[in-house]
Image: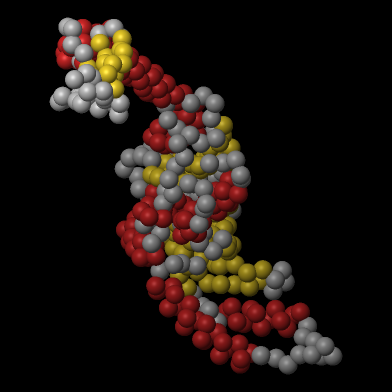
């Protein structure tokens, strides 16, 4: 029932010897020739009797002793395999153990396996009982710790992140324990609307590891549970041994729900702390880690809102100042100023064009009058007006030399014309 290398080697040797002995004890049976119950019982008794005196290790799950009785009865449990065996011993043997044996203790028993044929029951008859030393327990825990670390069960990358605000918290704790009160009260104080799904189980003794493991598995299957807290108060190394059981540790490592370990006090360190996704030093610390403070969050939101308001007010004031500066610019103060300036330029150009056109027409009129006066002054009519006449022949050619007598002539004067005949 032990977990040390010595027990493993012993099991291997016992298996080989047992196989050889079983073959030597084999009997021929068939449906037509079955073996009587007594024969089977005798063979089993012979087989068990050959085991002799052996050292067996386990945890005391139950201890029964009656006042005045000479015999005591112990149920020795292997927590790793969830297996129990009955042990009988004399009360003197039980009383010789120091300190006194109590339920939950880990002990080593020097006993002889026995088989009571009439009832078909198996038990161990103890001759000596010893406590498992603290040094051996610590060494065994260290070996288990090294093995689990090598498998990666303590690795940071496999740990799950806690939700910011869980809807429901699964709580595994002792019945009406101070640890349960600390977790619930501190969570409710930080966020009053949080709900709990509590499983009260033994957290010390022979049945603790199996009960806690079953409660964790049940809560892990519940859809509404966002985080699971495993908690109990402080205690000795022996008291906290269930939370270093390999079966529990592997069950926790396989959970889909984040697990928070809140076992004992700051100085307590069961292996569950290393496998769990989050380790809390105390049950109160667990409440602080899994649930934010409503008051702190409200203060954070209020502070953030004030900062946003201040930033917006500062931004609005800056934009208002920029707008005021822009409005004071001439182009925005008098938007038509640019148009007015260009209108003045257009008006000036228009007046200049009008003056230039008038001057041009005036000069053209004067030039035309001057030209007309010259034309008039130089025209034939002006010569005729001065008393001259134009004498033309019959063919309308102007007479420029004397013509023979009797030649018909046409004479133009200033105010008309008449015909004449040249005389000698």
Percent across and percent down for residue 286 are 42, 37
Q: How many marks?
A: 0
**Foreground pick, 417 / 325:** 417
Residue 246 in sight in this render = yes
Instruction: Give the residue drawn at x 61%, y 91%.
Output: 23
Q: Is residue 350 above or below residue 112?
A: above
The residue at the far right in this view is 32
The residue at the far front in this view is 424
In the image, taking residue 193 as reference, residue 3 lies left or right, namely left
**Foreground pick, 108 / 295:** 295
Percent across and percent down for residue 153 are 40, 59
Instruction: Give the residue drawn at x 38%, y 62%.
Output: 152
Residue 178 in sight in this render = no
Q: Is residue 299 above or below residue 255?
A: above
Classify residue 280 by image quadrant.
top left
Q: Is residue 280 above or below residue 306?
A: below
Percent across and percent down for residue 323 are 29, 13
In the image, taking residue 385 as reference, residue 18 lies left or right, namely right
Please state, as top left, top right, bottom left or bottom right, where the C terminus lies in the image: top left
How is colour applied across the structure in the image?
secondary structure
Instruction: Give the residue drawn at x 19%, y 25%.
Output: 403
Percent across and percent down for residue 46 are 62, 82
Q: Is residue 341 above or below residue 73?
A: above
**Foreground pick, 254 / 99:** 254
Classify residue 196 by image quadrant.
top right
Classify residue 143 by image quadrant.
bottom left
């Amino acid at each position: 029932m032990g977990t040390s290398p010595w027990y493993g080697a012993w099991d291997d040797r016992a298996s080989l010897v047992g196989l050889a002995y079983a073959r030597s004890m084999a009997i021929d049976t068939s449906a037509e020739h079955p073996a009587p119950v007594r024969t089977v019982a005798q063979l089993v008794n012979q087989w068990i009797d050959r085991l002799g005196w052996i050292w067996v290790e386990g945890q005391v799950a139950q201890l029964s002793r009656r006042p005045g009785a000479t015999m005591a009865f112990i149920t020795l449990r292997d927590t790793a395999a969830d297996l129990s065996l009955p042990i009988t011993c004399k009360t003197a043997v039980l009383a010789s153990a120091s300190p006194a044996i109590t339920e939950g203790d880990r002990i080593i028993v020097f006993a002889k396996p026995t088989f009571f044929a009439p009832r078909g029951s198996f038990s161990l008859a103890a001759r000596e009982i010893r406590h498992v030393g603290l040094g051996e327990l610590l060494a065994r825990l260290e070996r288990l710790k090294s093995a689990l670390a090598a498998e990666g069960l303590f690795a940071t990358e496999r740990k799950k992140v806690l939700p910011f605000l869980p809807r429901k918290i699964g709580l595994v704790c002792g019945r009406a324990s101070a640890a349960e009160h600390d977790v619930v009260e501190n969570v409710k104080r930080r966020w009053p609307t949080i709900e709990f799904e509590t499983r009260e189980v033994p957290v010390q003794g022979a049945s603790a590891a199996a009960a806690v493991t079953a409660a964790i598995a049940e809560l892990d299957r519940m859809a509404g549970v966002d985080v699971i807290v495993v908690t109990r108060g402080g205690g000795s190394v022996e008291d906290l041994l269930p939370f270093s059981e390999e079966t529990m540790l592997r069950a926790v490592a396989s959970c889909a729900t984040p697990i928070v370990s809140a076992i004992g006090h700051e100085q307590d360190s069961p292996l569950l702390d290393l496998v769990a996704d989050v380790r809390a030093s105390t049950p109160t610390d667990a409440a602080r880690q899994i649930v934010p403070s409503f008051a702190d969050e409200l203060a954070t939101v209020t502070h953030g809102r004030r900062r946003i308001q201040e930033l917006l007010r500062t931004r609005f004031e800056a934009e208002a100042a920029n707008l005021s500066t822009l409005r004071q610019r001439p182009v925005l103060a008098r938007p038509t100023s640019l148009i007015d300036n260009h209108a003045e330029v257009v008006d000036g150009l228009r007046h200049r064009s009008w003056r230039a056109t008038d001057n041009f027409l005036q000069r053209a009129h004067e030039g035309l009058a001057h030209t007309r006066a010259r034309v008039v002054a130089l025209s034939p009519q002006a010569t005729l007006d001065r008393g001259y006449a134009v004498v033309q022949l019959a063919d309308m050619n102007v007479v420029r030399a004397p013509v023979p007598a009797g030649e018909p002539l046409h004479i133009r004067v200033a105010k008309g014309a008449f015909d004449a005949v040249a005389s000698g």
